[in-house]
Amino acid sequence: MKRAILIIGICTIAFSAGNTISLKLLGEGPYLSVEYERNFFQKELWSQKMELSAHAGLGMNMLGFRDELSLPLGGRIYWGGPKHRAFLGLGLSLYHLKQYDYYDDENTRELRVLLIPALGYRFGREGINASLQLSPVINPGNTPAVIWLGISIGWGF
């Protein structure tokens, strides 16, 4: 019991909380998504703050395909000052879609796993923030990667 309390105490001190809710266009969603992100580790590195975060969200296709949903999950490493930060990220998006199969002459449903790395910049930390990211969307085994320039606006608390 004492060991469990000690581990919880150490984790509470080592992991600092920072939350962001954002609306993303052409990000890990991969089209339009709402995302929750939590920073769980911070450390000083070369006089700048380095942070690790994890995110999860819910996405949809904004082009009128209401049967397409995605669940973006992933992590990011931020590095920078109090307002300006660069980041590297790696995300997976579970992507459910309905499409017409011309060979079988019927509608089919598919579940795909998309790999979406990201390189970007975020302005702001608490309160309103915005980011810009370069995200190649990799659909393993099906099509070549598509490179998207994603944007987001969010609220940090």
Image (spheres, rainbow, N blue to C red):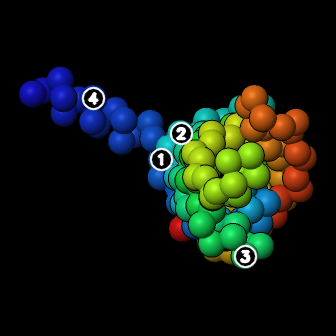
**Circle 2 residues within 10 Å: few <14, some 14–19, many ≥20:** some
Q: Which residue lies furthest to the top in this view?
A: 3
Q: Where is residue 12 in the image (x, y as percent from the top left)?
A: 36, 42
Q: Which of marks 2 and 4 is nearer the N terminus?
A: 4
Q: What residue type is labelled 1?
A: Ser
Q: Where is residue 56 in the image (x, y as percent from the top left)?
A: 54, 53
Q: Which of marks 1 and 3 is in front?
A: 3
Task: Identify which residue, 82 or 1, lies in the foreground.
Answer: 1
Label 2: which residue? 41
Q: Which amino acid does label 4 sit on?
A: Ile
User: Which label belongs to residue 16?
Assistant: 1
At 72% across and 76% down in the image, what residue appears? 64
CA distance separating discs 3 and 4: 49 Å
Secondary structure under the numbered disc 3 in the rendered image: loop
Q: Find out whether the residues at labels 1 and 2 contact each other: C-beta distance under 8 Å.
A: yes
User: Which label belongs to residue 64?
Assistant: 3
